């Protein structure tokens, strides 16, 4: 909460801080009213520069945050005007970015208005208690806030005091509160010359200089707010109001702790010249892109995020970086691993092998055996790893390298033998079985 010696006005700062937190509620004091308008008051939510905010409810049980001007300010026309402007701003804004105005009475002895109660902590409290947000979290909150500011600015309103304690993190998304010093288009100033309206470290340079405020003023404040969310600290450090205001105008923001994905955009928001800052619409679109990209990267960090089919194909065709002994023999024989049977010479012998026999890699190869590249009878030819670069030997047009048309690839990367090899194996198996059976019959006769 600000004090007269602070040199700035921060209306209902603690109100914004407590408006969404059950733990911040306090019992009503003796001087507090019990009923305001048609609302029954239950608890104090906080007090700020303009008044006190209560938790109340109507006859239907709808909960509201009800703000009442302090008694000593109720007779001050300047504060009544400012209060009326806050209510007017709340009425003009459409969309889910702010707490919806429920009711108001500007002519009461102590003017008041009630807005929808927003459950959830402030951005300030969340960062203070849990630490800085991730790039994805900060970008998502920033995207929602900038989209909300589009609606605020379309209503002809400039908030002028956007900061972490004026942002509530409700279950339905962030909400901007406390339009107590909002600037309506065409309104005249209600502050004295030389008085900066806002919170040091979050207000824009033009506010410090007393220049006209524009939607770009809120963009600067949002940039400082996002820096705070990502770093857990103000981008202009700490110090007295005078020191902070000087830094805002003359020094560059310190963004060392801001993630690389967010830093360029935050720095653009904190440009000293309002014309160099992005618009709220541009900011919303860019932050949405960053939030989506960072969320995707965090979700799949350390894992292959390619589709299953691509991962399987990559695993099958992944170069091993070496050729084992069996693969080397195939290579020297003029055939690459996984290639189809080469042209035969003589009586069924492969090129480069002895006549009348089919070569077999591995121990125990004999005449008439079926080629294989690993141990264990009946195993399908196994690839020992593809050579990097260029198509495999035996590749056919219209199909994957090294894969026969119509052949299926198993999840383990094995390719079944071709039909000719299967028929050869079946024939050998049948002949061996008949010979064994004939042998058993002959032994029984003797």
Image: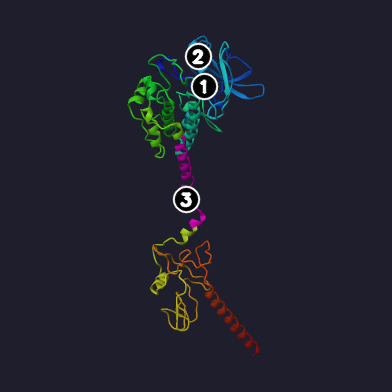
Q: In this view, does 245 lie to the left or right of 414?
A: left
Q: Mark 3 points at which residue?
A: 303
- Residue 302 in magenta? yes
- Picture quarter containing residue 245? top left
Label 3 or label 2, whichever lies nearer to me, is 2
Q: Earlier in the sequence, mark 3 or mark 1?
A: 1
Query: x, y percentage for residue 141?
Result: 49, 34
Identify the coloring: rainbow
Residue at the spot of label 2: 81
Q: Name the residue under label 1.
A: 89
- Which quarter of the figure has residue 41? top right
Out of 278 and 11, give the one closest to the viewer: 278
Q: Residue at x 42, y 24 (%)?
A: 214
Q: Is residue 278 above or below residue 398?
A: above
Kindly give the residue lying farthest to the bottom in the view shown: 446
Q: Which mark identifies residue 288?
A: none
- The kind of secondary structure element at disc 1 is helix
Task: Report whether 57 appears left or right of 141.
Answer: right
- Magenta-colored span: 284-311
Q: Are marks 3 and 1 in contact (CB under 8 Å)?
A: no
Answer above or below: position of 190 versus 61. above
User: Does 24 appear in magenta?
Assistant: no
Percent coordinates x, y for residue 291 in the rendering: 47, 39
Q: Can residue 50 be seen at all in this image of the molecule?
A: no
The label nearer to you, 3 versus 1, is 1
The C terminus is located in which quarter?
A: bottom right
Specify which label sits upstream in the sequence, 2 or 1.
2
The secondary structure type at the circle numbered 2 is helix
Q: How far apart are marks 3 and 1 (CA)?
A: 49 Å
Percent of width and height locating residue 144: 50, 33
Query: Badge 2: how crowded within 10 Å, few (<14), some, or many (20+)?
Result: few
């Amino acid at each position: 909460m600000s004090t007269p010696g602070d040199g700035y006005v921060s209306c209902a700062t603690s109100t914004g801080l407590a408006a969404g937190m059950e733990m911040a509620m306090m019992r009503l004091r003796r001087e507090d009213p019990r009923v305001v308008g048609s609302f029954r008051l239950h608890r104090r939510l906080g007090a700020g520069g303009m008044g006190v905010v209560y938790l109340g409810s109507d006859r239907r049980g709808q909960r509201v945050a009800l703000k009442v001007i302090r008694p000593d300010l109720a007779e001050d026309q300047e504060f009544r005007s400012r209060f009326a402007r806050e209510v007017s701003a709340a009425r003009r804004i459409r969309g889910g970015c702010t707490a919806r105005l429920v009711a108001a009475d500007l002519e009461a002895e102590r003017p008041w208005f009630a807005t929808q109660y927003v459950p959830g902590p402030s951005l300030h409290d969340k960062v203070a208690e849990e630490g800085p947000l991730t790039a994805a979290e900060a970008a998502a909150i920033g995207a929602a806030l900038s989209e909300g500011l589009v609606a605020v600015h379309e209503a002809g309103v400039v908030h002028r005091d956007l900061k972490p304690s004026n942002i509530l993190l409700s279950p339905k998304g962030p909400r901007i509160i406390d339009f107590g010093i909002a600037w309506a288009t065409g309104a005249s100033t209600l502050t004295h010359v030389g008085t900066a309206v806002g919170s040091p470290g979050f207000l824009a340079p033009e506010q410090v200089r007393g220049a006209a405020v524009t939607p770009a003023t809120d963009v600067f404040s949002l940039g400082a707010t996002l820096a705070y969310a990502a770093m857990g600290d103000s981008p202009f450090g700490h110090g007295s109001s005078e020191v902070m205001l000087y830094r805002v105008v003359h020094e560059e923001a310190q963004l060392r702790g801001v993630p690389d994905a967010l830093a360029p955009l935050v720095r653009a928001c904190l440009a000293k010249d309002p014309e160099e800052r992005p618009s709220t619409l541009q900011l919303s679109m860019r932050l949405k892109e960053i939030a989506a990209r960072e969320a995707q990267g965090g979700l799949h960090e350390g894992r292959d995020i390619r589709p299953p089919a691509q991962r399987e194909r990559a695993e099958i065709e992944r170069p091993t970086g070496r050729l084992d002994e069996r693969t080397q023999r195939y290579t020297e024989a003029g055939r690459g691993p996984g290639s189809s049977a080469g042209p035969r010479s003589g009586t069924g012998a492969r090129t480069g092998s002895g006549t009348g026999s089919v070569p077999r890699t591995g121990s125990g190869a004999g005449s008439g055996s079926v080629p294989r590249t690993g141990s264990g009878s009946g195993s399908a030819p196994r690839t020992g790893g593809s050579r990097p670069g260029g198509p495999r030997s035996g590749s056919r047009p219209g199909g994957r390298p090294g894969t026969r048309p119509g052949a299926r690839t198993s999840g383990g990367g094995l390719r079944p033998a071709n039909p000719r090899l299967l028929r050869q194996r079946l024939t050998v198996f049948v002949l061996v079985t008949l010979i064994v059976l004939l042998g058993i019959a002959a032994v029984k006769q003797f």
